[in-house]
Amino acid sequence: MTRLEPVRRNHGAQKALGLVFGIAFGILLQKAGVTRYEVIIAQLLLVDFTVLKVMMSAVIVGMVGVHFMHGRSWVNLSVRTGSFGSTVVGGLIFGAGFGLLGYCPGTVAGAAGQGAMDALAGGVTGLLFGSWLFAWLYPRLSRFLDRGEFTRQTLQEVLHLSTWKTIPVVVVLLVALLLGLEWLGL
């Protein structure tokens, strides 16, 4: 039994940790400026890459953190399959909301939390309505969603490298991309 086993069994502690980490994530999104409509629209117009920089930084931290925790048996990793159909439908839904309102689900929550009425009225309502609509349409979409199944393959398996040999390669590439964006003034 690991030191974290009591937390795994305690659903109240898991909810409290989720709330604390969710609030921290929202604060970081707000401090980075990606909860502002102008910043997101500037990203979509390819004139300000703040959103991409925040996302790439989050990928680096998350990748290292998850694999560190997995190495200590604090979390379990489960690679899921995907499909072309679900990727297309998910991309269309995400893209429609992102393009129409200028927020993604994470940034709309942060923007609503800081008092942006467009995020609260349009974003939260859109998330709820979109979730309901997808659930209602799911029986009709399920055949399409399963088309073109992807294999359960990780980047490490594709590269034929161990996890801790793959991570530095990805980190170096992402940091180089971040530095390149800064150098270009984006």
Image (tube, rainbow, N blue to C red):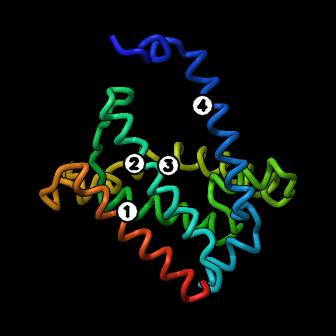
Of the image marks 2 and 1, the number of the one nearer the N terminus: 2
Cβ–Cβ below 8 Å for labels 2 and 1?
yes
**Which label sits in the foreground, 2 or 4?**
2
Q: Looking at the image, which is closer to me, 125 or 113?
A: 113
Mark 1 is surrounded, within 10 Å at the Cα level, by few (under 14), some (14 to 19) or many (20 or more) other residues, namely some
Residue positioned 83% across, 51% down in the render = 114
Mark 2 residue type: Val
Vertical position of residue 137 compared to residue 94: above or below: above
Which element type, helix, strand or loop, lies under badge 1? helix
Choose mark 4 or mark 1, whichever is in front: 1
For marks 4 and 3, the one nearer the N-term is: 4
Which disc, if any, is residue 18? Answer: 4
Q: Amino acid at mark 4?
A: Gly
Q: Is residue 147 left or right of residue 105?
A: left
Image disc number at residue 64: 2
Q: Which quadrant would residue 96 be assigned to in this image? A: bottom right
Three-letter amino acid code at the position of disc 1 = Val
Cα–Cα span, label 3 and label 1? 39 Å
